[in-house]
Amino acid sequence: MSFFITFEGVEGSGKTTQIRRLKKYLSRKGIPCKVTREPGGTRIGEKIRKILLNPEHREMIPLTELLLYESSRAQHVQEVILPLLKKGIVVLSDRFADASTAYQGYARKIDLKWVEKLNRLASFGIKPDITFLLDCPTNLGLKRALERNRRVKNEKEGRFEKEQIEFHDRVRRGYLALAKKEPERVKRIDTRQGEEKVFEKIRGLVDELMGLKKIKPGSHRETDPTV
Ligand code: TYD
């Protein structure tokens, strides 16, 4: 059994807590799983992350940003995600290609066709089996993200939190459009219901996914879009 599960959302949507809870839940059930993240997840990807999220890099143009996210993704898919799925390990990723559609496409306004093309290229044909979109009104999420950054004194990763509210509104609109376009895969969950209820929903959907759909290890189709 191997599943690829991703978590998306605006800043401060509580992804990290929910991923941790799902990992614990699956481990207790004896289902092997690994948590990873984007940008990052590999040695090279973590270096790219530092470049991307450094608030001093104000001069970074949108295309550079997109290409860096896609570079991190390509390395992540080949080095971590595909090998794990082939071994039958469930992969839980904190963000994946949908984030580029929402942030670089909808919010930075790069042509969506390009973003989708690059997403396909960097994903080597894999798509999440299910994506949890943890959603809440933009101002609520941002408030939480800023409080968290102040609490943990995370000054090196604040580039996106510094964006204007309109930027984050566009991100949210992008995610909501994805959920509308692919309702089977992208599940929107309102985080205002609180951590417990959100997790109940996630657990229910994961149980359903794993019970209904049995995938043999290695059956995730891999394509090489570069040939
Ligand atoms: P993340 O670590 O999830 O930050 P947070 O926990 O604060 O939500 O993601 C880092 C930032 O990178 C986040 O602001 C979203 C952004 N991002 C993109 O703009 N495009 C992408 O493709 C990805 C994966 C992330």
Image: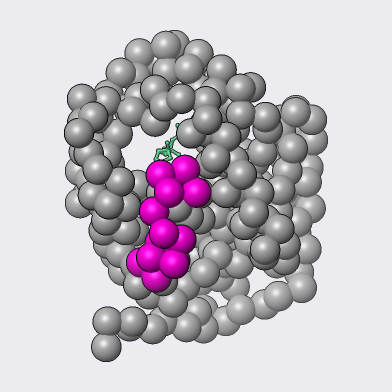
Given residues 190 and 137, the one toward you in this image is: 137
Q: Is the N terminus in the top left, top right, bottom left or bottom right quadrant?
A: bottom right
Q: Position of residue 47 (x, y in %)?
A: 20, 43
Q: Is residue 190 left or right of residue 99?
A: right
- Residue stretch rendered in magenta on the structure: 106-119
Q: Quadrant of residue 193?
A: top right
Count of residue discs: 0
Q: Is residue 110 left or right of residue 10?
A: left
Q: Is residue 78 left or right of residue 34?
A: left
Q: Is the C terminus in the top left, top right, bottom left or bottom right quadrant?
A: bottom left
Find out whether residue 130 is within the magenta segment.
no
* Residue displayed at 35% across by 13% down: 153
Image-quarter location of ligand 1: top left
Q: Position of residue 208 (x, y in %)?
A: 78, 63
Given residues 226 and 112, the one toward you in this image is: 112
Q: Main secondary structure of the magenta part?
A: helix
* Residue displayed at 57% across by 34% down: 169
Q: Quadrant of residue 138?
A: top right
* Residue displayed at 67% across by 65% down: 182
* Above or below 72: residue 117: below
Q: Position of residue 4 (x, y in %)?
A: 54, 64
